[in-house]
Amino acid sequence: MSKKIRVRFAPSPTGFMHIGNIRIALMNYVFAHQKSGTCVLRVEDTDLERNVAEASVSLIKMLRWLSLNYDEGPVKGGKYGPYIQSERTSIYKKYLDEMIQNQLVYRCFCTREELEKKREEQVAAGLPPRYDRTCLYLSDDKIKEKIEAGLSFIWRFKINQESIIEIETMERGVLKFDMKNFSDFAVTRSDGSVTFLFSNFVDDHSMKISHVIRGEDHLSNTAMQAALYVACACPLPKFWHLPMLCGADGKKLSKRDFGFGIQDLKDAGFLPMAILNYVAILGTSFEQEIQSLGELVSNFNFENISSSGAIKFDMEKLRWINHKWIERVAISKLVELVKPFLNDQIDESLTLSDKKLEFILEKVRTDLKTLVDIGPVLCFYFKRPIVDIQEIEEKFGVDKTKFVLKIIKENICLINKTEQFLDISKKQAKDYGLKLNVFFGTIRYLLTGRFNGISIHDLFEILPDEELEARLNIKNSI
Ligand code: GLU
């Protein structure tokens, strides 16, 4: 029987979830769900200097907002927990003790300054910077002496530089690393805490992770971690390194690029399903581009992964997908998503019932590119527009304006009978030789302050009769 599929998303709580992270979280989710596997969330918070308070909570909330639910992880728990690295110290200690016993690691007393000096000398001599193994060759007496003198040390992993390490990847097949190109690396820090390379390996192994799906920036870490697996006689997982995202200029995306941060996108009115949909189709080709999470789980082809180099982040495409999702999502969900944006922009909207908002939204949803657009699109409903006859005259000409206003005035008594009002008015407009866009454009302008936009029928349905009457009842001399 094949090994059970277990994947993990392992973010560091640095306070910034970006589109690259989410792509990795999504691919883990889709892979696990398609293969009836398990998706684990692990918070990698061992680097105290980079941790941001509350970031773990906010990343869990963000995953929830995106509906990227996990099977095991913080809060939820599971058989292989704890799922927060800072709570796994005793597990790391056990692995480290075993490695110490098997002489796979050694104490290194070199100071930061000494290491830096050696590095500079190597670089100046045109050599690749490698730890020169000064401490590997210390005698037992010397080590004892240094410990007694209270010198701080780290544990360094002794790489077998004679070895070639092979890893199996989903994107590049088997990769071989000549370990003579790698330096003995630290598995602990001088304060005793463990490094990313070590804790990440221990966790993947002890959590029985079968596939490590992560960013290409971890490729060189993979080689070093694979050396740990081999040294500890642990079976290696399979890897998939996803390409990095870059901007239109080809540079790696950064915090400064709008759209990179998920919170920015959320605040700018992007739908969670649109974000997921966009990151899923990045760098792949789908006949049908708009897909829900469930559809992605069914349709994503993991047999066909290639390493495509960096992928360009295209804000316009994301906007287009967002627009498609605003048209597609269930109306009740759209109400829930759009309400905070509407309430933020228009105080009067606070009293609007969900039912009414649903009714109106059905008619205007195609005008929204992002949820922020709801304010400008719907403000006509809450506030009478300030209109000026001169603007109509400038657009359609003085004579035509006069006729349109005359028709409206004559038929305004029929305003509560929409069809009748429109039929009679249209007929009269024809008699005056007016094009329908002149007639409808004027009505739309009087009702909304804009010549283009929502259909007249929809406007008549959305606005109460007395409001229609008040807005169309232009007091001017015709
Ligand atoms: N904590 C690492 C990061 O946020 C991820 C490591 C991994 O996926 O293996 O980059």
Image: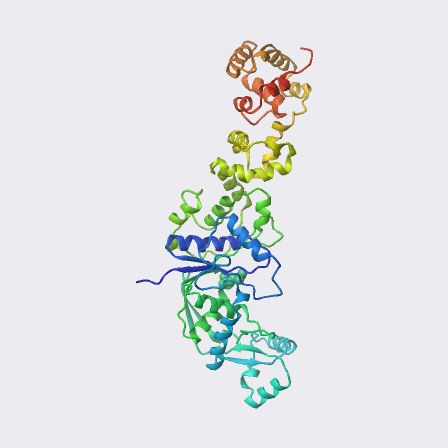
Asked whether, in this view, residue 447 is left or right of residue 100, the answer is: right
The image position of residue 134, as x and y in percent, is 57, 83
Q: Which of 20 and 298 is in front in this view?
A: 298
Q: Quadrant of the C terminus?
A: top right
Q: Position of residue 320 (x, y in %)?
A: 51, 40
Is residue 252 in view from this perspective?
A: no
Q: With respect to residue 190, does 436 lie above or below?
A: above
Between 2 and 313, which is closer to the camera in this rendering? Answer: 2
* Position in image of residue 112 (x %, y %): 64, 75
Residue located at (57% from left, 72% from top): 193
Tell how many labels: 0
What is the residue that sits farthest to the left in this orientation? 1
Quarter holding residue 126: bottom right
Residue 439 position by quadrant = top right
174 up-or-down from 120: above or below: above
Of the 4 image quadrants, the one containing the N terminus is bottom left
Residue sticking out furthest to the bottom: 141
Q: Is residue 222 left or right of residue 376?
A: left
